[in-house]
Image (cartoon, rainbow, N blue to C red):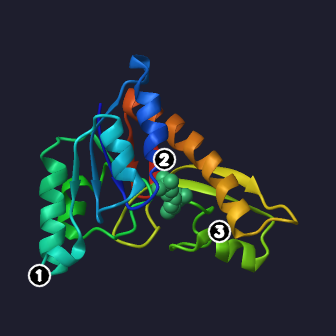
């Protein structure tokens, strides 16, 4: 299966996927990495793995629609079976969702629907929850609202701060991402309403 991965930052989830794909039995390969900004470690990781990259900054386009069209076209060039947002910090638009909506995955660092948005672990810690985690889901038009594929629980420790909690979630999140992407590409999936079924 062909994976296109979208990143905005350090790319540790991307790295976990690239590493998993080194085993032919995994059944997938990262064919391209896209970003919404230059100068991020995620792009360096792609280059180091010999994976082609493209960068589509929102600011490079006159409107958000133009950006959405360009991103959709760049992803489509690589004919992905799955597109994976791994720390990609932009909400895609209608054009992108029309093209990839049934195969666009995102990983979020809380147990959705609690604490959506970019400060998930900070918000979970501030709220005082004792268990949080990571959620893998298919993206819909909302922010962190799409049908859930899998979740993993991570306990909050009394001495956690935002950094320690974020790091512990990321470890579980990477394992979940690798496991579930492998399962999806090997076994297929159907989405019916909010329910994701893997045969
Ligand atoms: C992940 O924890 C994701 O949930 C959040 O950003 C992080 C991405 O990290 N939105 P990385 O770039 O894969 O290291």
Disc 1 or 2, which lies upstream in sequence? 2
Q: Quadrant of the N terminus?
A: top left
Q: Residue at x 46, y 31 (%)?
A: 19
Q: Which residue is mark 1?
A: 62
Q: Nearer the viewer, residue 142 or 191?
A: 142
Residue 171 disc label: none
CA separation, marks 1 and 2? Answer: 31 Å
From the viewer's side, name the closer residue of 47 and 64.
47
Q: Which residue is mark 2?
A: 13
- Secondary structure state at the residue bearing disc 1: loop
Q: Earlier in the sequence, mark 1 or mark 3?
A: 1
Along the polypeptide, which appears first: circle 2 or circle 3?
Answer: 2
At 40% from the left and 28% from the top, the residue drawn is 21
What whole-number distance in Å separates the C-alpha atoms at marks 1 and 3?
34 Å
26 over 7 or under it: above or below: above
Residue to which mark 3 is pinned? 121
Quadrant for the C terminus in the image: top left
Q: Secondary structure at mark 3?
A: helix
Residue at 21% over, 78% down: 59
| Observer able to see residue 104 | no
Specify few, some or many for label 1: CA neighbours under 10 Å numbering under 14, 14-19, or 20 or more. few
């Amino acid at each position: 299966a062909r994976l296109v991965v979208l990143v905005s930052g350090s790319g540790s989830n991307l790295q976990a996927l690239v590493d998993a794909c080194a085993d032919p039995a995994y059944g997938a390969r990262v064919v391209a990495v896209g970003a919404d900004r230059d100068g991020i470690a995620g792009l360096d990781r792609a280059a180091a793995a010999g994976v082609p990259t493209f960068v589509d900054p929102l600011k490079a386009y006159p409107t958000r629609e133009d950006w959405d069209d360009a991103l959709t076209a760049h992803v489509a060039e690589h004919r992905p079976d799955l597109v994976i947002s791994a720390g990609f910090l932009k909400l895609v638009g209608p054009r992108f969702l029309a093209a990839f909506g049934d195969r666009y995955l995102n990983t979020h660092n809380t147990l959705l629907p609690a604490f959506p948005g970019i400060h998930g672990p900070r918000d979970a810690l501030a709220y005082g929850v004792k268990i949080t985690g990571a959620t893998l889901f298919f993206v819909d038009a909302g922010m962190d609202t799409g049908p859930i594929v899998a979740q993993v629980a991570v306990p909050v420790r009394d001495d956690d701060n935002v950094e320690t909690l974020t790091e512990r979630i990321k470890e579980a999140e990477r394992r979940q991402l690798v496991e579930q992407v492998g399962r999806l590409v090997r076994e297929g999936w159907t989405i019916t309403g909010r329910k994701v079924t893997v045969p």
